[in-house]
Amino acid sequence: MGGAELINQPGTYGVQGTASTANTPSARFGAVGWTDTKGNLWLFGGSSGTNSVAPLNDLWMFGSGEWTWMSGSTNPDQSGTYGTRGSGSAGNTTGVRVYAVTWTGTDGSLWLFGGDGYESAGLTGALNDLWNYRQGQWTWISGSAVVGQTGTYGTLGSGGPGNAPGERGQAVGWKDVSGNFWLFGGLGYDSVGTLGQLNDLWMTQP
C-alpha cells in the first residue's frame, strides 16, 4: 500500500492537517494506533530508526489512500505540554513515547495511556497519564505530568477519583461493549514504587 522497501527511511510530513499521496511516516517501532468510527487508521509516536532510535510524538491519520500529519513535532525527544487537566487546547500535546496503550471511544475520539517517554519537564521514564484526542485537540484527562508515579489501588472492585494505575509501558488494553476501557499488566511501578512486571487489572469509564 505504501512505504519503502528499505529500512530506516525518514518521514515526509508535508503540511500539518493536509493529506497528500507524498506524505508518509518515518520508520519506527513501539508506535500505537487506533481505528476511528469512519474506518480511518491513526498512528502515534514510537521510536524512530532514522535518528539514533529517538522517540517521537507525531500523530498521523491514514484514509482514502493518503497520510495526514495531524499533530506533534517533526523532531524527536519532545516533552509534553499538559495544559489544564480536563481542558482541551490546540497548544496541548503528549510528549514522545513508545509502547503506550490506546483505544477508540464510542464517540470516535482517541484515548492514550502511559508508555515510556518524556513528561512535562523533559525527564524520561514510564508514564501513567491518560489523554483524549478529539476535534484536533489533546486533553490531559488524568494521571501525572511527571515521572516516578506509583499505583494508587484503593479498594478492590470499587472505583474512586483517587485511584490510578502506576506508570507503565508495554501493557495491553481493550474496550468492552459498554465503552469501558480495560488495562492489564505491563512493565512499571507497583503500589510501593517497585519496578517490575505487573498483573493488575484496571477498568475506567471515560
Image (cartoon, rainbow, N blue to C red):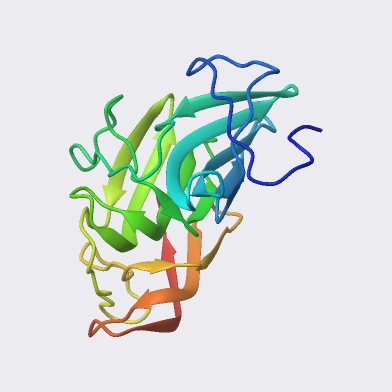
Residue 92 image point, x, y percent:
28, 33
Residue 38: image quadrant is top right
Residues 49 and 195: in front is: 49
Q: Residue 23: horizontal and vertical position, in percent? A: 63, 23
Q: Residue at x 28, y 81 (%)?
A: 155
Give above or below for 12 relative to 93.
above
Displayed quadrant of residue 138: top left
Q: Quadrant of the N terminus?
A: top right
Q: Where's residue 68, x and y in %?
A: 58, 23
Relative to 140, residue 202 above or below: below
Q: Considering only vertical position in the picture, is 70 above or below 86? A: above
**Count of picture labels:** 0
The quadrant where residue 85 appears? top left
Residue appearing at x 27%, y 27% in the figure: 91
Left or right, 7 with reference to 199: right
Residue nearest the viewer, comparing 168 with 174: 168
Kindly identify the residue that appears in the image at 49 percent across and 35 percent down: 59
| Left or right of 197, for residue 65 | right
Q: Is residue 138 left or right of residue 66?
A: left
Residue ID at (46%, 36%): 58
Q: 202 or 19, which is in the foreground?
A: 19
